[in-house]
């Protein structure tokens, strides 16, 4: 896919609306044809909709797959002997989980794009990294949970990677102190999932009245605030409370899902979630799936140029969001900016950090 390779040659946020659409016109058609020819279930869906795969369409006109379909079907567009990694969404016992099948090309492209996006937002150097989770999550390298995939993906940004939680999800305070001592004069990167950081890091430090000095840190977290709504914790409150227990000033949220790993949407210094050159979003009215204008809430459709091995380039999520603008963020980056409102009512609760098995 030559046009996609050209796109990979760009920085993460340097294409305006018109330039990006020109690339996507070619790339999305190629992906549609690829999955039509490689995935029988996807072919059946396109045929049922009488969708013409032979011509280019506008981004908004490509059919989307409801994210729940990845729970109900094993959607794969390559022979199974080309699958090098299988990722699963999070879920409590008894829930169905999504299975996402990655070939080498898709896996490499996910890593490449993740690095481009995070480098633009955080800077190009590799920071000493503290993962606020347990190392047990990444034991099986061929079968990744959303948490494991996230940890390994973002670990590319770090060095001296240290895990803050033990195998029983208990905070290793002495281990964290030793890490901070080793890197006391350096910028450090902390990574974890929103609820796990809150439950196993913030609450433990608050209860112990142990205050760590992480004023030189950058905290990157994702997974959503769904579980924290019960405790009246929003993005601003989250940042404020963490600052109280560890002095951290720079906290960066990101939005993404295992069904489109690599195509994350990071919060810039102005507090807005951003699309990159490699992904896009469309806000859809839940009643008729029409496209919502800026400022109107609706279901979030996620577009990614990355998935070769499974038909995940256009997915309708169960999340409600709202566009803030496009190519007009004060941070200077191009792309759409948006915010997450919550989940559609009666949707199955799930998220990278919101559900995990307690031992």
Image (cartoon, rainbow, N blue to C red):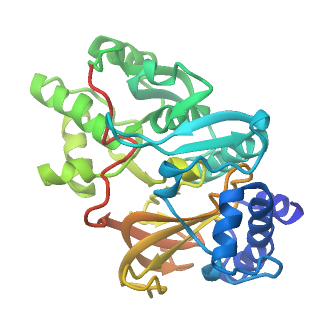
- Please say whether residue 96 is visible from this viewpoint: yes
* The C terminus: image quadrant: top left
Q: Is residue 34 above or below residue 112?
A: below
Based on the displayed image, in which of its 4 quarters is residue 343 positioned?
Answer: bottom left
Q: For the point 59% across and 44% down, which residue is it?
A: 100
Q: Nearer the viewer, residue 135 or 146?
A: 146
- Please say whether residue 12 is visible from this viewpoint: no
Q: For the point 41% across and 50% down, which residue is it?
A: 252
Q: Is residue 53 above or below residue 139?
A: below
Relative image position of residue 65 (x, y in whole percent): 56, 65
- Report whether 133 appears left or right of 144: left
Q: Nearer the viewer, residue 350 or 278?
A: 350
- Report whether 300 appears left or right of 209: right
Relative image position of residue 313 (x, y in whole percent): 64, 62
Relative image position of residue 233 (x, y in whole percent): 18, 52
Based on the displayed image, in which of its 4 quarters is residue 300 positioned?
Answer: bottom left
* The N terminus: image quadrant: bottom right
Q: Is residue 114 above or below residue 34?
A: above
Q: Nearer the viewer, residue 200 or 162?
A: 200
Q: For the point 77% across and 38% down, which residue is it?
A: 104
């Amino acid at each position: 896919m030559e046009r996609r390779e050209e796109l990979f040659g760009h920085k993460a946020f340097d294409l305006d609306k018109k330039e990006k659409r020109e690339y996507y016109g070619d790339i999305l058609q190629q992906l549609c044809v690829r999955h039509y020819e490689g995935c029988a279930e996807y072919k059946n869906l396109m045929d049922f909709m009488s969708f013409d795969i032979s011509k280019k369409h506008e981004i908004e006109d490509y059919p989307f797959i409801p994210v729940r379909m990845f729970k109900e079907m094993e959607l794969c567009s390559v022979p199974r002997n080309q699958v090098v990694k299988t990722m699963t969404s999070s879920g409590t016992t008894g829930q169905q989980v999504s299975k996402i099948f990655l070939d080498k090309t898709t896996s490499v492209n996910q890593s490449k794009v993740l690095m481009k996006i995070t480098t633009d937002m955080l800077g190009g150097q590799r920071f000493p990294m503290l993962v606020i989770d347990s190392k047990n999550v990444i034991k099986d390298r061929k079968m990744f949970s959303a948490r494991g995939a996230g940890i390994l993906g973002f670990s590319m940004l770090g060095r001296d990677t240290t895990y803050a939680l033990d195998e029983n999800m208990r905070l290793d305070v002495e281990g964290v102190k030793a890490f901070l001592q080793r890197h006391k004069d350096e910028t450090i990167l902390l990574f974890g999932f929103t609820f796990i950081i809150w439950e196993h890091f913030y609450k433990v430090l608050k209860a112990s009245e142990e205050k760590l000095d992480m004023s030189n840190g950058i905290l990157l977290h994702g997974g959503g605030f769904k579980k924290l709504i019960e405790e009246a914790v929003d993005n601003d409150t989250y940042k404020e409370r963490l600052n109280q227990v560890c002095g951290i000033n720079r906290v960066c949220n990101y939005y993404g899902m295992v069904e489109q790993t690599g195509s994350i949407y990071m919060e810039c210094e102005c507090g807005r979630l951003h699309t990159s050159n490699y992904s896009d979003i469309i806000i859809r009215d839940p009643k008729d799936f029409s496209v919502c204008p800026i400022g109107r809430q609706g279901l979030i459709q996620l577009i990614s140029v990355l998935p070769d091995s499974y038909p995940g380039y256009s997915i309708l999520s169960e999340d409600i969001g709202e566009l803030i603008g496009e190519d007009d963020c004060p941070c200077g980056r191009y792309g759409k900016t948006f915010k997450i409102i919550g989940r559609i009512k009666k949707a199955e609760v799930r998220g990278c950090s919101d559900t995990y098995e307690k031992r």
